[in-house]
């Protein structure tokens, strides 16, 4: 009995680990080409084609602070982006994100969005005025 419980606990934690790793890998494959995962240097800043992941999640979490609704928003947005739904002011610099329909499935997006929520912005992140140059200023 005890052995059965510890076995199922083991497979549960393995499952959780695999799921989390999956979201990270999928994000790197399908999103990080546009959304960088680190804070941009001034040089990178001028070459960016989209807001960094930390900026995206800063804005998403301001509106959707609970994980489930943040995941729902990200999944929906990646498949059907629109100006009305956009939370990032940087849309004015970068233009609307192209729909990722066909490049990523809903299930993959769930894993990706869960990873994004857990990872960004990193601890100690400050939304500075200096981010104006990143197109991340709010007004
Ligand atoms: C071809 C470049 C490109 C790729 C690939 C891309 N994005 Fe984006 N994304 C953008 C741009 C540009 C914006 C900023 C404009 C906007 O908000 O639509 C953006 C904004 C976003 C936002 C914020 C939307 C808001 O509220 O303003 C989310 C969430 C997002 N992307 C998720 C993703 C996910 C998840 C993936 C991978 C499946 C992905 N993006 C792949 C270009 C891209």
Image: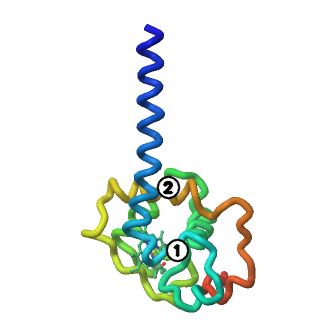
User: Of the residues tagged 1 and 2, which is closer to the observer?
Assistant: 1
Q: Is mark 2 within 8 Å of ligand 1?
A: no
Q: Quadrant of residue 137?
A: bottom right
Residue behind mark 2: 115
Residue behind mark 1: 36
Identify the residue at horizontal 46%, vertical 48% (top origin).
20
Identify the residue at horizontal 64%, vertical 83% (top origin).
41
Helix, strand or loop status at disc 2: helix
Q: Residue 24 location in percent, x, y?
A: 46, 57
Q: In the picture shown, does residue 59 fall above or below 11? A: below
Q: Residue 119 location in percent, x, y?
A: 58, 58
Q: Residues within 10 Å of mark 2 (few under 14, many from 20)?
A: many
Helix, strand or loop status at disc 1: loop
Identify the residue at horizontal 71%, vertical 74% (top origin).
127
Q: Residue 10 location in percent, x, y?
A: 46, 27
Foreground pick, 124 / 25: 25
Badge 1 or badge 2: first in the primary sequence = 1
Q: In the picture shown, does residue 28 fall above or below 33? A: above
């Amino acid at each position: 009995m005890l052995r059965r419980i510890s076995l199922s606990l083991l497979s549960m934690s393995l499952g959780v680990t695999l799921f989390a790793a999956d979201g990270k890998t999928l994000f790197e494959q399908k999103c990080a080409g546009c959304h960088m995962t680190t804070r941009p240097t001034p040089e990178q800043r001028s070459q960016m084609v989209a807001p960094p992941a930390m900026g995206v999640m800063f804005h998403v979490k301001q509106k959707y602070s609970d994980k489930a609704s943040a995941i729902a928003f990200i999944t929906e947005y990646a498949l059907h982006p629109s100006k009305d739904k956009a939370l990032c002011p940087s849309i004015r610099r970068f233009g609307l994100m192209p729909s990722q329909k066909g490049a990523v499935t809903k299930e993959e997006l769930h894993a990706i969005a869960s990873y994004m929520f857990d990872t960004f912005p990193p601890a100690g992140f400050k939304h500075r005025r200096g981010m104006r140059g990143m197109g991340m200023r709010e007004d």
